[in-house]
């Protein structure tokens, strides 16, 4: 472990947990948006609010880094982890926004698989963030996130194959692919977060 001149500011752990909790909310709202019988405009507004809350948590972490002499782990790793969590929310919010902007009524049924992966990854990430305090019991987290990302990749390829099988009009393909691409980017961003956590854990072990 690196030498500490004085106790590190533990507020960072709370802020990372807060960021991850926003992702759980975002994944739930995403599921609502892509479900049936919901007020999509209201859900989109709630997602924008959640994205704003996540941004605020990100800014709080940056301000804390810039004003803290001793951090719990490397500053660059703190920046990377916070930015990675923020990226996940941005991609989920983007997917919701595109549904509204493109006037998408129905998405391929396989899209539900992407959303399930995102909800599971959000829950796992929220559960893992408090364990940064001890850097213990984190390996199963990044292993499972990697498995989920692989599952998401497979689902994504199935969706793209379906979009290009001639069942959809060209314009509809472009709209739907925009949404599923955003979902895929969000899943990839979760894996990036897990990779960052793994790197931090290795450095601090």
Image (spheres, helix red, strand yellow):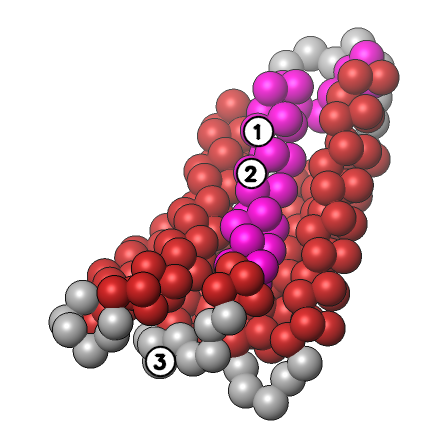
Whether residue 122 is visible, yes or no, is: no
Instruction: Please provide the residue range marked out in magenta.
Output: 68-97
* Residue assigned mark 2: 84
Quadrant of image for the N terminus: top right
Task: Determine whether the residue tagged by mark 1 lies in a helix, strand or loop.
Answer: helix
Question: Is residue 90 found left or right of 57 in the rendered image?
Answer: left
In percent of width and height, residue 41 lies at: 68, 72
Please tell me whether mark 2 or mark 3 is closer to you in this view.
Answer: 3
Q: Earlier in the sequence, mark 3 or mark 1?
A: 1
- Of residues 78 and 45, which is closer to you in this image? 45
User: Which residue is outermost to the left?
Assistant: 165
Comparing marks 3 and 1, which lies closer to the viewer?
A: 3
Of residue 41 and residue 149, the one placed in the foreground of this image is 41
Per the rendering, the mark at residue 80 is 1
Q: Earlier in the sequence, mark 2 or mark 3?
A: 2
Query: Residue 133: x percent and y percent?
Result: 70, 39
* Image-based side of 117 in relation to 55, left or right: left
Residue 187 pos. (x, y %): 43, 53
Q: Which residue is mark 3?
A: 109
CB of mark 1 within 8 Å of CB of mark 2? Answer: yes
C-alpha span from label 3 to label 1: 34 Å
Secondary structure type for disc 3: loop
Instruction: Judge whether 71 appears above or below 102 on screen.
Output: above
């Amino acid at each position: 472990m690196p030498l500490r001149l004085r106790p590190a500011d533990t507020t960072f752990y709370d802020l990372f947990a807060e960021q991850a909790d926003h992702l759980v909310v975002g994944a739930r709202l995403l599921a609502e948006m892509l479900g049936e019988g919901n007020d999509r405009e209201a859900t989109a507004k709630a997602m924008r609010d959640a994205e704003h809350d996540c941004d605020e948590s990100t800014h709080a972490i940056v301000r804390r880094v810039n004003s803290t002499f001793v951090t719990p782990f490397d500053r660059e790793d703190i920046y990377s982890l916070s930015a990675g969590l923020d990226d996940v929310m941005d991609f989920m919010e983007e997917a919701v926004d595109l549904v509204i902007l493109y006037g998408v009524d129905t998405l391929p049924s396989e899209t539900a698989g992407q959303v399930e992966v995102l909800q599971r990854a959000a829950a796992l990430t929220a559960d893992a963030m408090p364990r940064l305090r001890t850097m213990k019991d984190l390996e199963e987290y990044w292993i499972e996130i990697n498995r989920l990302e692989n599952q998401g990749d497979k689902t994504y390829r199935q969706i793209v194959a379906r979009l290009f099988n001639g069942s959809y009009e060209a314009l509809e393909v472009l709209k739907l692919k925009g949404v599923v691409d955003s979902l895929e980017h969000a899943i990839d961003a979760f894996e990036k977060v897990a990779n960052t956590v793994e790197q931090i854990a290795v450095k601090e072990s």
